[in-house]
Amino acid sequence: MGSAGDSSLLLSNIVDSSLRPCPAGQLAGPLIGYLYASSGSKNCQSFGILLKRFVKELNADGLKLQVVYVSADTHPKAFEATLKARNWFGYEFGPHEKLIAHFEKQFQFDREKFPQMLVIESTTGNLVTRHAVEYISGEGTYRLLEFPWRPNLEIALRKMYTKGMACENFAIYFADKDSKSLNFALASLSKALGPLKLRVFLVPMDQRIYVLKQWLDVLDVEWAFISPEDLERKFMLIDAFSAPRHPKLVITDKDLNVVNPDAAEDLGKDVEGKYFPWVSEEWLNLRTTLESSLSQTPGKRNTFSRLSSG
């Protein structure tokens, strides 16, 4: 999607203000920023000005990032006017719906939110970050990572994790107070296993610290957590584990190597943690049997459905 030879890519012609197909080889940078914005939004307009300055400064000593505009407007005239004014690459109105659908499927893209910008590797199509807007407009608050803002777990988990910690597994848990049943299940498991077996690093999706502390008090746990206001570290972890939605539970080994990237459903089926961290062949075979049994029992709900819904 969005390669140099993509016939849906357009480029503004600054000589006569026309839009023309993007010539082969023009979109050749290592990273592409797909900017999703609306011409009628003041926030989008302000960010567009900031982005143009940022890209100019960033590419001053060599091409690093190219921007492709993807319209959030409902009419092609608005898209064309914006593209001509910015002199960006643009994804043609109409075919851009397929691109948005691709982003929704691959990267959990939210078409109701704008502006937003995905930074993607041009050669592999892999996502680098979905939080480019926040990083660029952060006014000095997003400085732990330099462009291209690739996730770094040790930076994101600083003050909570250090190499050589005496613990077999870590749980990186994306949740809020409404994930009630799963919260209680993980709290119970962490107490049962103890800190030498499992430590939980909470990535709270609640926006207020007092709300977070209230539900941790109810759970009666002392989990390490990222402050809701520390957005950069949250963004790093969300990007690292593709976790824009929650709850999501990731289990790592003592060195932060992922052993189970999506363990919430496993916890739902084994709340006592008998098979923790749920990667053994015995557990995988048992899980298959459980799922088969549930699918053949009319009206019987999956345990995880109850947990994830609270």
Image: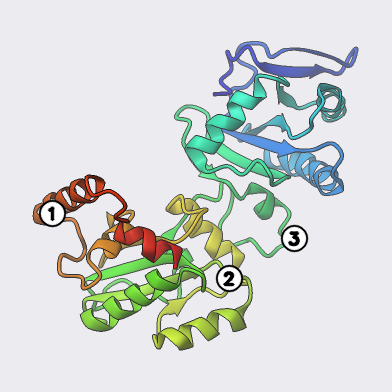
210, above or below 100, in the image = below
Give residue 167's quadrant in the image.
Answer: bottom left
**Can residue 60 be seen here?**
no
**In the image as oriented, which residue stretches furthest toward the left?**
282
Q: Nearer the viewer, mark 2 or mark 1?
A: 1
User: In this rendering, which labeled residue sits more in front, label 1 or label 3?
Assistant: 1
Label 2 to label 3: alpha-carbon separation: 23 Å
Q: Amino acid at mark 2?
A: Asp
Tell me which label, 1 or 3, sits earlier in the chain. Answer: 3
Mark 1 crowdedness (10 Å alpha carbons): few <14, some 14-19, many ≥20: few
Please give the residue where the numbered disc 1 appears in the rendered image: 286
Q: Which residue is mark 2?
A: 206
| SS category of the residue bearing label 3 | loop
Which of the 4 quarters of the picture holds residue 135?
bottom right
Residue type indicated by callout 3: Glu
Residue 139: assigned label? 3
Left or right: 262, with 5 as reference point: left
* Residue 226 x, y percent position in the rendering: 51, 73
